[in-house]
Image: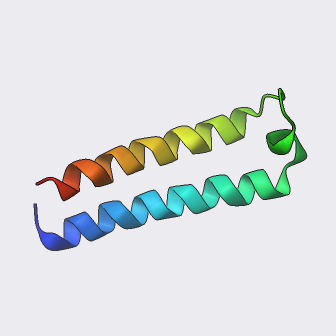
């Protein structure tokens, strides 16, 4: 993998994390213990996937 590819993957993870945090900050259901927020769950899943890919790319 080229060096730029690793940077792109890391940026994707950072962008996914920011999207999840910004959503949670602006949406009370995401901050309420026990509440379920489908969008928040999807954003966290996207972050987890991007972070996993970033860690995988670092190892190559």
Residue at the (83%, 26%) spot, across then down:
34
Q: Residue 6: x and y, percent?
A: 23, 64
Residue at the (64%, 35%) spot, across then down:
41
Residue 4: quarter of image = bottom left
Residue at the (79%, 57%) spot, across then down:
25
Relative to 50, 27 lies left or right: right
Q: Compared to 3, does 13 lie above or below? A: above
Q: Compared to 3, does 43 lie above or below? A: above
Q: Residue 29: x and y, percent?
A: 86, 39
Q: How is the image coloured?
A: rainbow
Residue at the (21%, 54%) spot, across then down:
57
Q: Compared to 57, does 42 lie above or below? A: above
Q: Residue 52: x and y, percent?
A: 34, 44
Q: In which quarter of the image is the N terminus?
A: bottom left
Q: Quadrant of the C terminus?
A: bottom left
Relative to 44, 54 lies left or right: left
How many marks the image carries: the answer is 0
Relative to 34, 20 lies left or right: left
Q: Residue 16: x and y, percent?
A: 52, 56
Residue 2: quarter of image = bottom left
């Amino acid at each position: 993998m080229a060096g730029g590819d690793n940077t792109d993957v890391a940026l994707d993870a950072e962008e996914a994390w920011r999207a999840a945090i910004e959503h949670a900050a602006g949406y009370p259901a995401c901050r309420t213990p026990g509440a379920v927020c489908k969008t928040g769950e999807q954003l966290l899943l996207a972050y987890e996937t991007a972070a996993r890919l970033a860690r995988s790319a670092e190892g190559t």
